Image (spheres, grey):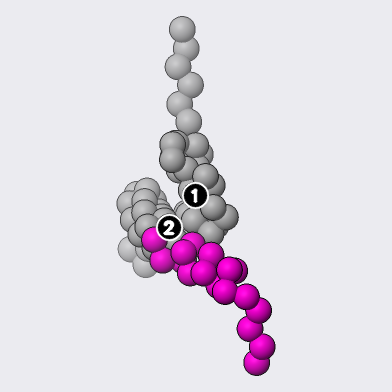
Amino acid sequence: MMRVCKPFYTDTHNRKPTASERGFAPFVACFVCILQGLGGTLVLLAVYHKALPALPISIFLAVAMFLLAVFVISPWIEYMWTAGPYYV
């Protein structure tokens, strides 16, 4: 039986509980952090001129932003949604 290995980037959105199950804000935050980790790795590659692992940057940023989005941003969005319209 052949085992199929999935890349890390698909696993960040396929495990339970996923960012997409917690709402749209955590999903977008994790997705953007994965792209930022890739960009950060490319910048470090240009600076140090040697290959560096991309996963630590993506994992750290995604976990930090997931927690921030779940415990701060999503409750704030819900509060603003239920508080009613604001007029300037």
The disc labelled 2 sits on which kind of residue?
Val
Which of 73 and 11 lies nearest the eye of the viewer?
73
SS state under label 2: helix
Q: Amino acid at mark 1?
A: Arg
Is 85 included in the stretch rendered in magenta?
yes
In-image side of 59 versus 74 (left or right):
left
Helix, strand or loop at mark 1: loop
Image x and y of residue 60, in percent: 33, 56
* Relative to 78, residue 19 above or below: above
Circle number at residue 68? none
Which residue does the numbered mark 1 point to in the structure image?
22
- In this rendering, position of residue 58 left or right of residue 74: left
Residue 72: x and y in percent read: 41, 66
* Marker count (numbered): 2
Please tell me in which quadrant of the rendered image residue 87 appears.
bottom right
User: Which of the numbered marks, if any, corresponds to residue 70?
Assistant: 2
Q: Is residue 83 above or below residue 11?
A: below
